[in-house]
Amino acid sequence: MYRMKRLGAAAVALALSLSLGAFAQPASAANQVIKIGIELPISGNDASDGIPMEQAATLAIEQANAHAPKGFTFQADALDDTVNGIHNPQQGVANIRALAADPGVIGVVGPFNSNVAAAEIPVSNQALLPLVSPAATDPTLTQSPRYRPAHPDEFTFFRVSASNDKQAHAAAYSCKQLGLKSIYVIDDNETFGTGLANIFTDAAKSLSLTILGRDHLTVNQQDFRPLLTRIAQMHPDAIYYGGVTSTGGALLRKQMADSGFDTAKTPFVASDGIYDQAFVKIAGPQADDTYFTAAAPNITKLVSAREFISAYQERYHTAPTAFAANAFVAAQVIINATVKAIQSNHGDRPSRAEVLKQLRATKEFHSIVGTFGFDASGDTTNPSMALWKIEHGTPSYLHAIDMRAVKKVVKS
């Protein structure tokens, strides 16, 4: 099993947050196993997002075993929610039921997609099984009790990324800053994309941007040219897309060139739902001049992430993605809560309810993506947002988005 040869910045932060003291000892075969589930799309169209997240969460679990509480070993249990190449809510539910049925599972890193999260949260709420998502960003997942029918007052879903309302506001603000005045809005008709597009539309209007129209894609739709040809006749300054690559984002951008658009003059604006290798691969040269917001910092600019980047590259021989960093942190925060629960139990194995209590109490957690806690709904108290642009087939970081400035001018 992989071990860090020395403690760097990220490992030091974890070691300090765990505060193990006399509990720390090397893992042994005789130790009790505490499993951390990983529930992500790790095959199919979303694999370029899912695999790095699964790998990063596994890395965090492996590193934690160097400082595990006495008598315990952490172990990853990864499940895939993909069916026929697409993330699938029903498969996600089946995965959460399987993880919940295993008493060894104390918490879960995931899911990635908001529609999968919407299906899974009622199941995890029934089992009081905590989910910590790297990226499921629909605001209602935390803000509405309708996903918690069994225990309405017991929130079991947390996320380390900013929610859609903040991301959509940041996108509208960025469009204004880029001088884009008229925009046509399209979404993929899924929980994440529709919610994002709804909030973006309202935010853009509050900034006096013109919304020329709004359309929804159909599941498994492949030809968007009739829709795009109609939109091209309106001469929008940009198209805003709410959704992910696998539900039409890349094809939509690619087919703009066949539908009366000069893609060099009509940018495509989206969210981090298209922040993956598949978007560039499918869209081809038309991927250029695409802007997207990302509900995660640019980890290459963070001193605190250097050790993580190095360890990830050594372990997997490739660079980590921004969401991989979020997944690493999601695993760490579950581990931290588990260790605190063990300490409160005087060294005995904690229940899921005890781990949930510690997660809800998380404040000032020092991570590779910044210091954060969870608010009363399970959202991060320190949301990060960045603007990227695809140039010459490569996503290029433009700048961090000042969310304080956004909040001052965007009206919900």
Image (cartoon, rainbow, N blue to C red):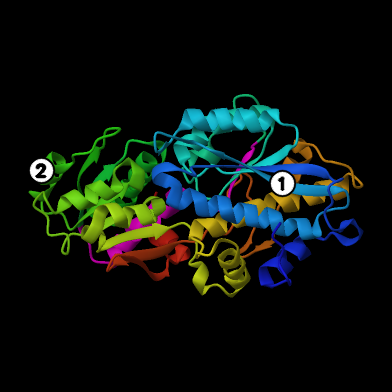
How many numbered discs sit on the rendered protein?
A: 2
**Location of residue 181 by image quarter:** bottom left
Q: Is residue 195 visible?
A: yes
Q: Single out the residue that lies furthest toward the top.
A: 150
Q: Tell which circle, 1 or 2, labels the residue nearer the N-terminal end.
A: 1
Find residue 392 and report its image quarter.
bottom left
Front-most of residues 203 and 127:
127
In reply to whether residue 348 is colored magenta, the answer given is no
For disc 1, the marked residue is 75
Queried whether the magenta region covers residue 168, the answer comes back as yes
In front: label 1 or label 2: 1
Is 67 placed above or below 146 here?
Answer: below
Q: Is residue 28 left or right of residue 262?
A: right
Q: For residue 184, say whether it is visible.
A: no
User: Going by the image, does 23 lie left or right of 97?
Assistant: right
Q: Is residue 169 above or below residue 99?
A: below
Residue at point 38% right, 52% down?
168
Question: Which residue is pictured at 26% across the width and 37% down the height?
Answer: 216
Closest to the observer, 248 or 317: 317
Residue 405, image x, y percentages: 43, 65
Q: Secondary structure at mark 1?
A: strand
Determine the secondary structure under disc 2: helix
350 horizontally vs 332: left or right? right
Q: State the image coordinates of residue 80 (x, y, percent, origin top left).
A: 52, 39
Any mark on residue 377, and which? Answer: none
* Residue range of the region highlighted in magenta in the rendering: 155-181
Specify the amino acid type for callout 1. Answer: Gln
The percent coordinates of residue 257 (x first, y second) are: 14, 54
Question: Which residue corresponds to the image point at 10% horizontal and 49% vertical from the top-left?
Answer: 259
Q: Is residue 97 above or below residue 2?
A: above
Amino acid at circle 2: Arg
Residue holding disc 2: 230
